Image (spheres, rainbow, N blue to C red):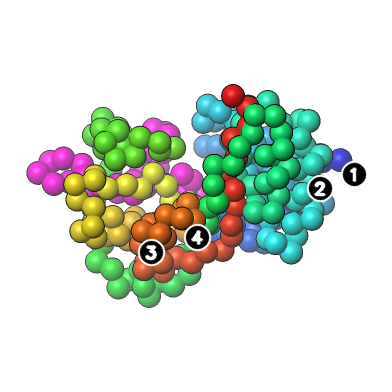
Amino acid sequence: MLPVAVHDRSALAALLRRDPALHAYELGDLDDFFWPWTTWYRLGDSLALVYHGAGLPTLLAFEQPEHLGGLRELLDGLRDLLPRRLYALVTEGAEDLLTSLPDAASRGLYLRMALTDRGRLHAQEPQGEPLSTADLADLRALYEAAYPENWFDPRMLETGQYVGVREKGELVAVAGVHVWSPEHRIAALGNITTHPRIRGRGVGRAVVAALCHRLLGTVDHIALNVKADNTAAVALYTALGFEAVGRYHEVSVGR
């Protein structure tokens, strides 16, 4: 069997909602805000998304280990259809189908984490205030100093789901979202950082807590991605009640 393109949002949502934390990004991309930039493929119950709205096309292909065979079959059928240059996020155990392509390389193992223990979250004192498009210049300055390799899309400030901490007027910590969908009751955190000079003071944990409290008014599931060997970040999210619900590789393809 060969993969088929899918254009029915309701059919996609039904498949993705079987595991909303694992598929948080894809569920968010069903919203009008992202939908025009997406291309979807299906084989059986496995899905792959190519997102075209962030410059380099990005492939998302996630599945639980017990369904890995279906995902591998889907990716094998897609290899000749994918853009020659792309960035991919692929469940562990299927990454070899992309790293075997010309000019491809793994960028490391990552964890998909989801908020599962709200008691831990509520034990943390939140800190921070909502940011808006008026804060864009300050936010860019913080990312340049603390997180130059970020995946920040300025459009996401329009969601109102970015929270920042200032010291003497300077923005020194931020927590934001990659996707936020009240319709699908899902959010994926991203572009989280603190200025190097204040790290270790708990400000990062507090600003993430503030954002999570804000999001829980509109969503049921909050997820995030973190590099598996980033022990400090994993510990921070674990302390706030997150746990790993999936493992995947990031892979760059082409030059």
Label 1 Cα crowd, 10 Å radius (few <14 / some 14-19 / many 20+) = few
Residue 250 in the image: x percent, y percent? 57, 44
Residue 171 in the image: x percent, y percent? 20, 42
Evaluate if marks 4 and 1 touch, with contact meaning CB atoms under 8 Å apart.
no
Quadrant where the C terminus sits is top right
| Residue projecting furthest to the bottom | 119
Label 2 Cα crowd, 10 Å radius (few <14 / some 14-19 / many 20+) = some
Mark 1: amino acid: Met
Q: Mark 3 to mark 1: distance in Å?
A: 43 Å
Q: Mark 3 vs mark 4: which is more N-terminal? A: 4
Q: Secondary structure at mark 1?
A: loop
Labelled disc at residue 113 = 4
Labelled disc at residue 235 = 3
* Pick the front one: 99 or 27: 99
**Residue on which disc 1 sits:** 1
- Magenta span contains residue 162: yes
Magenta stretch in the rendered image: 153-181
Evaluate if marks 3 and 2 touch, with contact meaning CB atoms under 8 Å apart.
no
Q: Mark 2 vs mark 4: which is more N-terminal? A: 2
Evaluate if marks 2 and 1 touch, with contact meaning CB atoms under 8 Å apart.
yes
Q: Mark 2 to mark 4: distance in Å?
A: 26 Å
- Residue at the image point whose x is 34% and y is 39% from the top: 147
Q: Mark 4 to mark 1: distance in Å?
A: 32 Å
**Residue on which disc 2 sits:** 73
Q: Secondary structure at mark 2?
A: helix
* Visible residue check, residue 71: yes
Label 3 Cα crowd, 10 Å radius (few <14 / some 14-19 / many 20+) = some
Residue 187 in the image: x percent, y percent? 48, 53
